Image (spheres, rainbow, N blue to C red):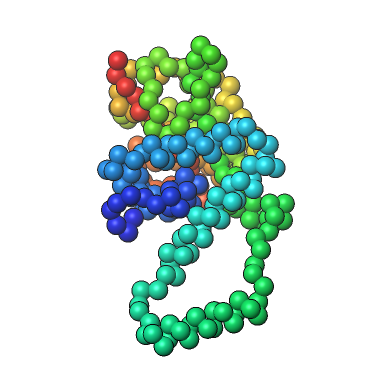
């Protein structure tokens, strides 16, 4: 959970958008954003990340995501190590002298260039499984951010980024509790994913008149699993098994 109510700092919002936070903390932060009327901050960040991924090749996207994640992590470390006690004047001066000597004796660390990022770091903290939701328009296609407003009759096209994961299930649930499978389209084993780039599902779909919301979930794993595990998770709200990871995106449905 968030440590206190109030505005969610940018560094923590970056980690929330990147899917780096534990589920309980993420839920608490989303509730905080909703209570403060700041859900658009998270939606704008998600849109920015999606636009970067869609517009640039992987070789340029990865360093950008690495930069954002590293910046958020540095802010978290600063908050964690900030002292909560007061030093005496003498201790403060001594500490300052030690810091000066340390700076003189040791060269300042220089962040590695993007091409020097360790491959294992990219694999773990770079691209992650994600959904991209597009709405068909007269002009072509519109990328929808999290919490975007949609309506009955809108035609949506789902795209996914597997980020190296081998198996996946994409499903949705509406406010009435109806679960729909999008990948695969029938119950059974999880689908084998196209593991590189952004992939478009073969069939678009039209939103019905169910009010409230439409919540999508993309569950992935390196080992086979069943669609039933995802359907039960959507209906019960229970946590997924540790071997499964999930990306969620909720759209708000407006009644005409």
Q: Residue furthest top?
A: 138
Residue 84 position in % (x across, y down):
36, 74
Residue 149 position in % (x across, y down):
37, 25
Name the residue located 58 percent from the left edge and 21 percent from the top edge: 202
The foreground one among 79 and 220 is 79
Q: Looking at the picture, does residue 13 appear above or below residue 198?
A: below
> Which quadrant is home to the C terminus?
top left
User: Does the image show residue 192?
Assistant: no
The foreground one among 184 and 52 is 52
Q: Looking at the picture, does residue 85 appear above or below residue 10?
A: below
Describe residue 241's horizontal placement relative to residue 129 as left or right: left
Task: Residue 85: name its quadrant.
Answer: bottom left
Name the residue located 51 percent from the left edge and 60 percent from the top edge: 74
Q: Looking at the picture, does residue 90 appear above or below residue 154?
A: below
Describe residue 12's horizontal placement relative to residue 38 as left or right: right
Task: Residue 160: name its quadrant.
Answer: top right
Describe residue 18's horizontal placement relative to residue 62 as left or right: left
Name the residue located 65 percent from the left edge and 80 percent from the top edge: 105
Residue 89 position in % (x across, y down):
38, 85
Name the residue located 39 percent from the left edge and 22 percent from the top edge: 150
The foreground one among 136 and 72 is 72
């Amino acid at each position: 959970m968030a440590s206190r109510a109030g505005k969610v700092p940018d560094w923590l919002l970056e980690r929330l958008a990147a899917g780096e936070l534990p589920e309980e903390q993420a839920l608490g932060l989303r509730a905080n954003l909703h209570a403060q009327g700041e859900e658009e901050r998270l939606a704008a960040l998600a849109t920015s990340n999606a636009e970067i991924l869609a517009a640039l090749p992987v070789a340029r996207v990865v360093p950008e995501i690495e930069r954002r994640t590293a910046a958020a992590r540095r802010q978290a470390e600063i908050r964690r190590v900030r002292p909560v006690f007061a030093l005496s004047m003498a201790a403060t001066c001594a500490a300052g002298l030690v810091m000066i000597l340390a700076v003189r004796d040791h060269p300042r660390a220089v962040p590695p260039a993007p091409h020097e990022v360790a491959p294992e770091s990219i694999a773990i903290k770079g691209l992650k499984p994600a959904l991209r939701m597009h709405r068909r328009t007269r002009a072509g296609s519109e990328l929808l951010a999290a919490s975007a407003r949609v309506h009955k009759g809108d035609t949506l096209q789902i795209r996914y980024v597997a980020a190296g994961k081998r198996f996946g299930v994409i499903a949705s649930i509406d406010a009435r509790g109806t679960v729909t499978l999008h990948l695969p389209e029938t119950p059974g084993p999880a689908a084998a994913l196209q593991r590189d780039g952004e992939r478009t599902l073969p069939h678009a779909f039209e939103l019905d008149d169910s009010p409230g919301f439409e919540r999508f979930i993309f569950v992935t794993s390196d080992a086979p699993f069943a669609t039933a595990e995802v359907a039960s998770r959507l209906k019960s709200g229970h946590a997924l098994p540790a071997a499964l990871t999930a990306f969620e995106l909720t759209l708000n449905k407006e009644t005409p």
